[in-house]
Amino acid sequence: MRYKMIAIDLDGTLLNDNKKIRKENIDLIRKINDNGIEIVIATGRRYWSAKNLTKEIGIDIVIMANNGNIVRKVSNDRLLITKYLELEDFYTLVEQGRKKGFYPIVHVNHYHEGYDMMIEMDIDDIKYSSYMNKNQDRYKQIDDFLNYKDGKVLAVCFSGDIDKLEKFEKMIKELYPAKYSSHIMSKLTIVGGLLEIMHPLGSKWLSIKEYAFDKGIYPKEIIAIGDDNNDIEMIKKAGLGIGMKNGSPKVKEAADIITDKTNNEAGVAHILRKILKLDI
């Protein structure tokens, strides 16, 4: 198979545990790019953070941030895809969360205004379960989410105990079928469990497929690599789905192949070198 695009997750995949990209990964990505295969970054991170973490790669890439709900090209920050929650659907999540004692961190597209997240309480409030911290930047504290009117909500994130988050997610799905897409992240060790709720068409895979289609690239010509539960769909549906050795059990179950090295050992470079038969 002649692959034409590779979608790579960041945390736990391209990044090591110190949030750096190992030189082996950088060198191989550059080589792949030189060979005419497009690299895209597909991450749950906000665009600003992902752009800064990948700038060392030194090539003009497309970043699918916030799990594909916003897509930009790094050379000029040009918007390619946006998927915003309807305001009424956003308000519903806020109200239902409050009933269960959940208070979300809200990801928004206010990149050029200098903030990417919104909170209601103090940044170090225990309800945020270390998702936010005093060193956090590019956030805005507002009095009440129900007064937000700009309509640029990308994701609503609830942190806390995984069992409680699973019950809340199940309730939302039962009350509002097909209204949202969601997943629970299980490998964010500092944060703990994290439930992300988004636009019903908000997913890494759907944005990858949409972007690739415009370039004449078919799903079978795409490789997808990831480690956590928000990567499962793209791993299942890409032409070749790769799970990281350090990935979640569900990711490994979904993957066609699993790397023999972890994110701390440049597992991405090692597996892609074998698949693409590159000498570097």
Image (tube, grey):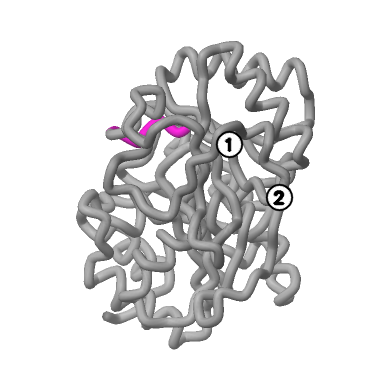
Q: Residue at x 48, y 41 (%)?
A: 141
* Element at label 2: loop
* Element at label 1: strand
Q: Magenta stretch?
A: 185-189
Q: Identify which residue, 251 or 278, lies in the foreground.
A: 251
Tag shown at residue 156: 1
Quadrant in the picture for residue 210: bottom right
Up-down relation of residue 28 to residue 235 (above or below): below
Q: Identify which residue, 215 or 42, lies in the foreground.
A: 42
The type of residue carrying mark 2 is: Asp
Q: Residues within 10 Å of mark 1 (few under 14, many from 20)?
A: many
Residue 261, given in percent of the width and then of the height, sits at 25, 52
Instruction: Answer left or right for 195 relative to 93.
Output: left
Q: Is residue 161 visible?
A: yes
Q: Identify which residue, 117 or 216, lies in the foreground.
A: 117
Between marks 1 and 2, how big is the CA–CA gap?
15 Å
Up-down relation of residue 232 to residue 80 (above or below): above
The type of residue carrying mark 1 is: Val
Q: Is residue 188 magenta?
A: yes
> Which mark is first along the chain, 2 or 1?
2
Quadrant in the picture for residue 93: top right
Mark 2 = which residue?
150
Instruction: Answer left or right for 49 relative to 166.
Output: left
Q: Residue at x 59, y 20 (%)?
A: 97
